[in-house]
Image (cartoon, helix red, strand yellow):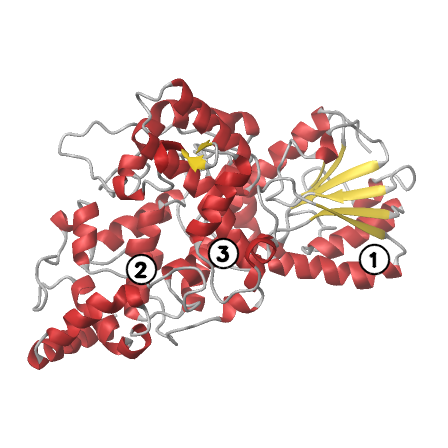
Amino acid sequence: MSSSTEPVFLSSACKLQLNQLPEKGLTTVALILGDQLNASHSWFKQTDDERLFVLMEVRQETDYCRHHVQKVVGFFAAMRKFASALADAGHQVLYLTLDNSDNQQSITKNLEAICKTTHACQVQLQQPDEYRLDRQFQDWSAKVANKLDIRVDWFDSEHFITQRSVLQDWFGAQDNYVMEHFYRRVRKQTGYLMDGEQPEGGKWNYDHDNRKTPKSGHDYPKPLLFAHDVTEIHQLLLAAGIDTLGEIDSKNFIWPLTRREAKELLTDFVQRLLPSFGDYQDAMVTGQWSLYHSRLSFALNAKILAPKQVVDAAIQAWQKNPEAISLNQIEGFVRQIIGWREFVRAIYWQFMPNYGERNHFKHKRPLPDFYWNGETQMNCLAQSIQQSLDYAYAHHIQRLMITGNFALLAGCDPDAVDAWYLGIYNDAIEWVELPNTRGMSQYADGGILATKPYVSSGSYIHKMSDYCTDCHYNVKSKTGEDACPFNLLYWHFIDRHFEQLQGNGRMGLILKQWEKRSKEDRQQIIQEAEQFLESL
């Protein structure tokens, strides 16, 4: 074993093998997953020479879907930084790199080999946030660990504000749940933005104030970017033949990889961007990929930052400077963290494993090729997809009302849509991706999460972006050769799912509008929409 001041990196370059681990003295093996980089976890409060922390890069995780190259590189780089930090703090750390000859490319197979080598009698696991890993570890614990006479102890990740079972605990078993009800209860439980028993300012939600678009000549903030050289990891992926998508500048990797960097990004957000965050959080502007968004989702979902840490920093900034940061700015941000983020995780654990099989509208169309290359004459899609390929990032409205909206209107298979969203974004882990995509975006869950399908014609996109200005199509044309495809597909969606939508009160006005159109008008729209879909 190397000294405790640096981790053992098992790689072909170092020529170290598992049999170089000590056979005595290590009684406990503690696994740290790539999305469990929580330096504040109680595991790390004191050092223990008999406990070995293990992190590993495995094909199991690179290959379960086609990931963006920045996503894989980002997680591996952050894991390596975290392992080094643990070793610097005096912990025993084993890091298994992707190219080591002893790497069996399976988390549980590697765990078993490490336990056999060290003769450890205990394995410690933090609860994973993905169902597939939870099931894998549960099965391994019941079979292999018992066979090896190893005790498996489970620990909370100590990250989230609420528990997995929170929906059942608070509201009982229901067919669907309302995020606003959940959000208000979390506000009351935490005391965030509360004035006694009432919400700060007298209102729970200021979403109506957060739908502005920048005027011409707006002075846009430049995003804080980092410049990591991750060439070694990128070359490792290429040598291993990992199939990825998207672009990367491996000499200048822009995302935070350590807690210090994530805190720097958080500080920059609350000081420089939060004063305008709420106003423009739904806006989309050509060439402005970050606007006033925090871009903390990768750091949060890897658990480099904690939600409480993020919300505390934002609220403290608002309290210190309420003249610059209005209530709608801070409430909109807090709602994303303690409301929406916690809620989708709760939905995930309440309805898995069947949630990932739901297909309310029975959609089966393949996802168009332009989702992988951005080559389409629809400018809003070209802009949003190319940005995603370039940065492994898009904000929530681009995901929901551009790429998601089109996929739903076109009747794309939610399995394919899920796989795309899970792969292309660096913050995409299934617990957060699946409810957001299959539920909120595609309404494939039939209303468990959202109160209505989030579909729109081109008018919403025109209102919230400048994308329509330079588009091949005319957003104001409802039919004809230059008609915006969103206009055609919107009414095509309403027509083909008319009966299913009749039971949804929030869709009543739209359905009546469709019924009032002339038969000839409806037939022309349907015909042109179907011609467009065939062209895909």
Question: What is the residue that sits farthest to the top in this orientation?
Answer: 320
Amino acid type, callout 2: Tyr
Say whether residue 367 is left or right of residue 532: right
Which quadrant holds the C terminus? bottom left
Question: What is the residue that sits farthest to the right in this orientation?
Answer: 24
Q: Residues within 10 Å of mark 2 (few under 14, many from 20)?
A: some
Q: Residue at x 40, y 49 (%)?
A: 246
The mark nearer the N terminus, 1 or 2, is 1
Gap in Å between the C-alphas at discs 3 and 1?
33 Å
Depth-wise, is mark 3 or mark 1 nearer the camera? Answer: 1
Amino acid type, callout 1: Ala
> Where is mark 1, residue-wise?
145
Residue 100 seen anywhere in this rendered image of the structure:
yes
Determine whether 209 is above or below 416 in the image.
Answer: above
Say whether residue 332 is left or right of residue 230: left
Gap in Å between the C-alphas at discs 3 and 2?
32 Å
The mark nearer the N terminus, 3 or 2, is 3
Secondary structure of the residue carrying numbered label 3? loop
Depth-wise, is mark 1 or mark 2 nearer the camera? Answer: 2
